[in-house]
Amino acid sequence: ASSRLSAVAIGPIPGLLRANLQYRPQIVPGLIFDSKIESTSSRYARYNDVSLPAVTTLDAGVRYNTHLLGKPSTWRLQLYNLTDEYVLTPTSSGQLSSLDGRHFEFSLAVQI
């Protein structure tokens, strides 16, 4: 009988695809649409018998550069994890952390 061991890396993502896109419509200067799609392959967590499934997430956003009270300002709405995927990711300490569910952030930045 053969007692062959399998060398399996724990934690790293063997396959990762990330694409970031931006679109600036000429009709509205200062308006920018952006999106990110990220796909990770399945990978092993802390032990080679605990496999985390492959997952694809999608983020999207819009920002508008303008002036507020004569100062350069940026309005931004960012939407995260639009497909509401449940994702676990191994950390360097061996624990698993989860990605937040679908959520958004709205912000205003004014240069003083």
Image (cartoon, helix red, strand yellow):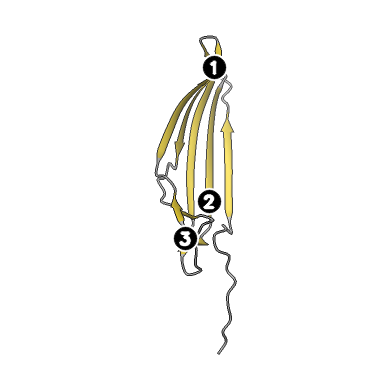
- Residue type at mark 3: give it: Leu
Badge 1 or badge 2: first in the primary sequence: 2
Q: Few, some or many C-alpha atoms within 10 Å of disc 3 (few <14, some 14-19, many ≥20)?
A: some
Give the foreground label among 2 and 3: 3
Residue lying farthest to the bottom in this orientation:
1
Identify the residue under disc 2.
39
Residue at x 58% of width, y 37% of height: 21
3D distance between C-alphas at marks 2 and 3 = 13 Å
Q: Disc 2, disc 3: CB below 8 Å?
A: no
Identify the residue under disc 3.
52
Q: In which quarter of the image is the N terminus?
A: bottom right
Q: Is mark 1 on a helix, strand or loop?
A: strand
Residue at x 53% of width, y 47% of height: 38
Q: Position of residue 15 (x, y in %)?
A: 58, 57
- Residue type at mark 1: give it: Thr
Identify the residue under disc 1.
66
Q: Where is residue 79 in the image (x, y as percent from the top left)?
A: 45, 36
Residue at x 48% of width, y 46% of height: 57
3D distance between C-alphas at marks 1 and 2 = 34 Å
In this picture, residue 101 sits left or right of residue 4: left
In this picture, residue 61 sits left or right of residue 29: left
Report the number of numbered marks: 3
Badge 2 or badge 3: first in the primary sequence: 2
Q: Quadrant of the C terminus?
A: top right
Q: Is mark 3 on a helix, strand or loop?
A: strand
- Residue type at mark 2: give it: Ser
Please say if 32 is above or below 69: below
Q: What element carries label 2?
A: strand
